[in-house]
Amino acid sequence: MISSIIVSLANAYTVIIFVYVLMSWLPDTTNGVIGQVYRALGTLCEPYLGLFRRFIPPIGGMIDISPIVALLVLQFVVRLIIGIL
């Protein structure tokens, strides 16, 4: 029971991070409803992604792989917790 809740929450957060990263590619995410959604997702994602951005610099100054690493770590931790339970 609790393991399925943990997996569901992790999956939901994974989708939120994925949508946030995809929205960062949009040309204008500062105005309107899209901007509000982007800022709301940023409020949820940036504290976690910021942990990884401190240690992983962008490749070539432009390509940020920290979301990929953050998602891998999230999935690893969830599997570890499920294994313990």
Image (tube, rainbow, N blue to C red):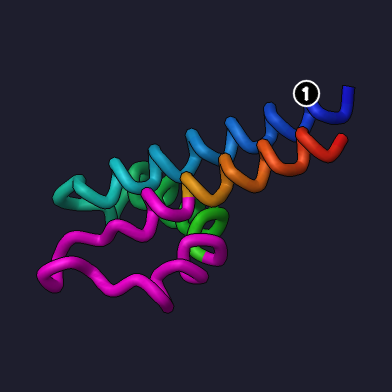
Tag 1: amino acid: Ser
Outermost front residue: 83
How many numbered dots are placed on residues in this image? 1
Q: In the rendered structure, does residue 34 fall within the stretch colored magenta?
A: no
Residue 12 position within the rendered picture, expressed as x and y whole percent measured from the top left: 59, 33
Q: Could you tell whether 3 is left or right of 77 in the image?
A: right
Instruction: Find the residue positioned furthest to the bottom.
Output: 54
Identify which residue, 3 or 83, lies in the foreground: 83
For disc 1, the neighbor class at 10 Å (few under 14, some 14 to 19, many from 20) is few
Residue 11's x, y, as percent? 59, 31
The C terminus: image quadrant: top right
Q: Where is residue 21 in the image (x, y as percent from the top left)?
A: 33, 47
54 versus 14 height, above or below: below
Q: Which residue is drawn at 14% across and 73% down?
A: 61
Foreground residue among 70 and 50: 70
- Residue most toward the left? 60
Give the residue drawn at x 68%, y 27%: 8
Q: Name the residue under label 1.
A: 4
Q: In this view, does 49 lie above or below 80?
A: below
Q: What element carries label 1?
A: helix
Task: Judge left or right: residue 77 versus residue 44.
Answer: right
List x then y, in percent, for residue 47: 55, 66
Left or right of 19: which side holds 11? right
Closest to the observer, 17 or 63: 63
Residue 50's place in the image compared with 82, above or below, is below
**Quarter of image, res 59:** bottom left
> Is 67 colored magenta in this rendering?
yes
Where the N terminus falls, by quadrant?
A: top right
Which portion, as a residue range, is magenta? Answer: 47-70
Q: Kindly indicate the quadrant of the structure image that contains residue 82.
A: top right
